[in-house]
Image (tube, rainbow, N blue to C red):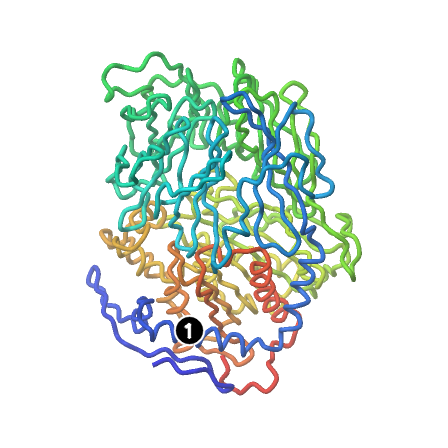
Amino acid sequence: MSHTPTPSGPPVAARRPHERTHHGDVVIDNYEWLRDKQDPEVISHLEAENAWAEARTAHLEDLRNDLFNDYKARTQETDLSVPTWETHTDGAAYWYYSRTVEGKDYPIWCRVPATHRDNVPDLTTGAPLDGEQVLLDGNLEAEGKQFFSLGALEVSPNGHLLMWATDNAGDERYDVSIRDLATGDTYPAQTGIAGNITWAGDEVLFYTRVDEAWRPHQVWRHTLRTDLEQDELVFQEDDERFWMWVSTSRDRAWVVIHLGTKLTGEVHLLPAADPTAAPRVVSPRHEGLDYDVEATADRLWIVHNATFEDFEVATVALGPLPDDPATPLAPSQTWQSVLTPPPGTRFSEVDAYASHLVVSGRHDGLPAVWLAEVDDVAGATPLGFDEPVHEVSAQSESDYDTDRVRLSFTSLVTPPQVREVGFSDRQQRVLKQTPVLDHPVHGPYRSEDYVQERLWATATDGTRIPLSMVRRADTPTDGSAPLVLYGYGSYEISIPARFSTQRLSLLDHGIIYVIAHIRGGGELGRAWYDQGKMTNKRTTFTDFIDAGQWLVDQGWTRPDRMAAIGGSAGGLLMGAVANMAPDLFCAIHAAVPFVDALTTILNPDLPLTVTEWEEWGDPLHDPEVYRYMAGYTPYENIAPVAYPAILATTGLNDTRVYYVEPAKWVARLRAEAQLSPNRPVLLRTEMVAGHAGVTGRYDKWREQAWEMAWLVDRLTGSGQVSGSGTTTV
């Protein structure tokens, strides 16, 4: 049994041996029983862990409230997003936007009639715009629900109907509704889908469903005002490595079915005007050929790696559809290269408009955007940005005939901006910068009060690792300042160097914040990713350790003043670092951590396992991969040594990383590691939440304040709890 926490100790999970045998290796797992969340004893244990975490951090209540009030004070709670222009097939044009209201948790999605793209509505007050029509009020939809997440929100091409999908548990399974925007009549369109849904004309929806492993594997078609049971299966993908999603091309000509593993892509098209037609493959899958398609009525734009590791842009004209639906529309041999990557460049995406292409990617480790005329793609020119560390992305415009594109821009010191760039003049105009309101103590936000830098640490093998750093300008740089090091390093994901209002509170406590862009991520191209995956995965961990050691060696901080943070696959990183370098950090926050990686990847019946084999390897069938993963998976490599203070956070309904991984990890740490009363291990589970945590902005701020208070206390406080006993770990 798990015992109710007392001032003298945390919950103690029962040891119930469970045997696992693979490749001749017998492993006894004493805490696998915690996997069954239908077991009342498991829920009781998680609740006891929550109670212990609250008791162990009760002295932080005032700090949590202060941090929450910081977030609130700096946020313009009644605000308006920058409206986006959309012209519908009935000829009507609207500005679409969302707004927030002080005291309300969720956005309100709205529209107003539009006359000209240059007449952007006034954004200064945040108040409802004249002529506003409310499409969906998230606060009304969330009433009486503990969890509310929107997976899709899209108006029909003629502008008459609204479709949206909601998740009310955190398990990423969505129910779809349709609303007539003239009458307000609302009716269900489907339940339990994967959250991916799109219009094909004004009467048909395409959506995806998941298999028993919660992998999107089917595309279905729903015709409005028909029985849901009459929906028809359009496409099914049986290869368990492939993920699936469906979309509609910007010019509304095609329904696009995207398929992809970590290494291989395939795309199918069907005419939106003929939604019952059979999907047609663009180019049949070829192992290792990773491609995706931006489709227009008469041309395809393809980003692929057939020739260049860091991808190129190709095109092919579309003629009449072949009579045989099995005939590929554009085999890879017909692709015509139009833009190849110069050294240090990785192309990732293309947005096609009537006159121009917008190409997204990275250059020299930073995000980049190129503009090109459709008739001269080779002449693509990069847009310039004047901050050494920044994040930028092109917003996908719904208007195919647009003469401009918008950018989302931010940096570690610049609040999020929406910029507009004309295709003709290439000039960037800031339409809005997210307000940061005056702080009652620190006064107005001024970017010059903070410093951001791009630094380069050196790994053990001599590789230079980019770091993004931000701190207050008056923070000491003599090694006395506390420092937080964040890392991820998986799935070729590049960690953005973006602004955070909440992070200001951390910086204002004199804490330096650093992002380590380690291998396994995508910051420096496909090779950077390949060097930190499969049987190179340890490189991700050693890069992070080397980055932390470099910061110490360069005099930025000390191990007793440095904390580490990572979530999901970054939580695996945290667990590995805790085992490999327990003396380098004084505290580690592992959020939704993938710390029982080997157990998960060995079980193909668990959600997403088979799709992950190209990221981590296949330990079920390959004994070498098994031994490699067994050597680093955090849960199975806990040592009888002193560990830093650890906070593990999770959500009971998380379908990406099950709550059981951190629950087992914490139980085993308590049983086998040498834990100090001054460096406790805590587990906090949100009982109605998924991978992204709680919903509702005020609850989210409370969650962030709880976690940040723990971090600030570990870095700047004594770490002691008044009246605690000697075994409170």
Side of 510 relative to 546 (left or right): right
Q: Position of residue 676 (x, y in %)?
A: 51, 79
Q: Residue furthest left?
A: 24
Vertical order, 173 against 484 (above or below): above
Q: Which residue is mark 1?
A: 669
* Corner quadrant of residue 18: bottom left
* Most foreground residue, 142 or 314: 142
Q: Position of residue 281 (x, y in %)?
A: 30, 25
Side of 584 relative to 414 (left or right): left
Tell me which residue sits at (64%, 77%) in the image: 718
Tell me which residue sits at (53%, 31%) in the image: 396
Q: Secondary structure at mark 1?
A: helix
Q: Quadrant of the N terminus?
A: bottom left
Q: Position of residue 186 (x, y in %)?
A: 44, 42
Amino acid at pointer 1: Leu
Report crowding for label 1: few under 14, some 14 to 19, many 20 or more residues within 10 A (C-alpha). Answer: many
Q: Is residue 460 visible?
A: no
Vertical order, 337 against 86 (above or below): above
Q: Is residue 140 visible?
A: yes
Vertical order, 437 against 726 (above or below): above
Side of 117 relative to 652 (left or right): right
* Most foreground residue, 158 or 689: 158
Tell me which residue sits at (37%, 45%) in the image: 194
Q: Position of residue 124 (x, y in %)?
A: 74, 40
* Corner quadrant of residue 300: top left
The number of numbered discs placed on residues in the rendered structure image is 1
